[in-house]
Image (cartoon, rainbow, N blue to C red):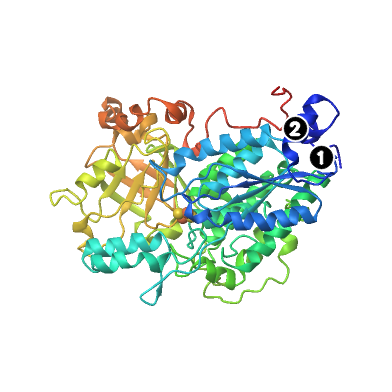
Amino acid sequence: MTELRSQDWYGGEGRDGYIHRAWMRRGLPEDAFDGKRPQIAIANTASDLTPCNMHLDEVMESVKLGVAEAGGIALDLPVVSLGETLVRPTAMLWRNMAAMAMEEMFRANPIDGLVLLGGCDKTIPALLMAAASVGIPAVVVPGGPMMNGMFRGKRMGCGTGVWQLSEEVRAGTLSQEAFLASDRSMIRSKGHCNTMGTASTMAIMAEALGMTIPGLAGTPAPDARLLEASQATGRLAVELVREGRTIADVITKESFHNAIVALAVCGGSTNAVVHLMAIAGRLGIELTLEDFDRIGAEVPLLVNLQPSGSYLMEDLYNAGGVLAVLAQVRDLLDPTPITVTGRPLVDYLDDRDVWNDEVIAPREEPLIAGAGIAVLRGNLAPNGAIIKPSAASAHLLQHRGKAVVFDSIEDFHARVDDPDLDVTPDSVLILRGCGPMGYPGMPEVANLPLPQKILQQGVRDMVRISDGRMSGTAYGTVVLHVAPEAAAGGTLALVQDGDEIVLDVPNRTIELDVPADELARRTPSPALVAGYASATRGWERLYIEHVQGADTGADLDFLVGASGSEVTRESH
Ligand code: FES
């Protein structure tokens, strides 16, 4: 073991070492600062206002046991937490802020290694972005999904159930009372959303990148095996420091290959695209939208989970879990990248049986043959846009329709159910002003509810296009992350009601069928400036001045890359 980073604070007999030791001693053992016991910070996103992560204090206690067993010193480090359902105007606005605050606290403190406790959507991405920019040894414990929701005898996935049932109310096929009564059936325990939403996806991404103990992602939050694995992770964190294995040793370009395969085979959230690209940017790894399409295109969808399928995360765990899924596509994985244990991910795929092939389909009978996220380009999205074909309607993947344009989500809500709205099932709903800069913060609003008069015709899906994101628990034929976004001067800002849009997912194109000279004469709608212009101070101001496009991960320009772990100046 090389000299511990923390010895820069605790070592020596001078006044500074004295101060650092004296204030920290508080009952720690005599040898706590002798340079042989790694200081392991547990970056903990537990918060009462992040209900999906509330239980992480309990998880932390198990991690602490493991750290102590292995001879380390465990330190609780509460960090910024983001509750997806509560935080306004959108948790994505704060992902980079959380990552920046975490990064600076990881750098500023006498820490040798990190255990990253996350769960709710933005927490694992922010933790990984921060740890990547600092570069000290780190390992993730995903907090795990909640138990299955059950409503009227059927599985009710959180998020997905809300979208489905609220549409039934609007269509007049479910009473308001029954809808309101369903919330207790949906959320039954601690843990994050139990669908293949963003939280589940990012836990799986962390595992596919090699950043968890293999087999841990997807362990339900109430399951005793989560605490068992958390204790083992505490021991592993100490080992990581002693062996000098850093996050850059674990996450390589090849690890992203495995993450993209895992994303496709599981039918994971489209949000993984912006998060993986942001993490790659912190590590100086070039990851492009085309990598997602190229690597994911031929990967079969095997996991039958809501929002696109039927089951929930607890079912996936009981069917064999993430490793059983990855074992089915072992030949598509890159065998070289190591995990935090020092061994390659593929080493953990032997004898991984599937116990329920309704939940994990056999390779030879996939739910969809090519399940990856498709990347579209054309005059409407020169820098790219994405769609998740596995969550879309097959008959809409090649479609021509007239645009019905909304300049903001407020504009949409004000007009969507107007009986005079000129919309048909073939129309293409356009929502703009929802990109990283435009909203600001790129909210999950792109899965627009359908107009009531369309729902009443029995139609449940239409083509929708936006520069915003879609909840990982949502579904539908939705083109997302259009770049450049409207507020940054993208063609999306020039679309007018009645323009024809041509979507061709098999050929990966999205076009606005308006002559170039006509587009050159148009100016963006003035209503688009509103959300952007209101960001006059604080983080929002900093964010809009520096945020980059969705096509590169929507990180701030000055946060891409790494600061490293060295801070030489002393505070006193
Ligand atoms: Fe926290 Fe879904 S709201 S994971």
Estimate the x, y position of residue 102 in percent, counting from the top left. 60, 38
Which secondary structure lies at badge 1?
loop
Q: Which residue occupies the foreground of this view, 461 or 154?
A: 154
Q: Is 391 placed above or below 174 here?
A: above
Number of labelled discs? Answer: 2
Q: Name the residue rendered at 71%, 33% in the picture.
A: 565
Q: Is 410 placed above or below 487 here?
A: below
**Badge 2 amino acid:** His
Q: CA distance from mark 2 to mark 1?
A: 10 Å
**Marking on residue 502:** none
Asked if residue 184 lies left or right of residue 212, the reply is left
Callout 2–callout 1 Cβ contact below 8 Å: yes
Which residue has dot 2 on it? 20
**Marking on residue 33:** 1
Estimate the x, y position of residue 80 in percent, counting from the top left. 54, 41
Instruction: Look at the image and tell me whether residue 363 can be seen.
Output: no
**Residue 515 found in image quarter:** top left
**Residue 65 found in image quarter:** bottom right
Estimate the x, y position of residue 266 in percent, counting from the top left. 54, 61
Q: Name the residue rendered at 71%, 65% in the picture.
A: 349
Which is more N-terminal, label 1 or label 2?
2
**Badge 1 amino acid:** Phe
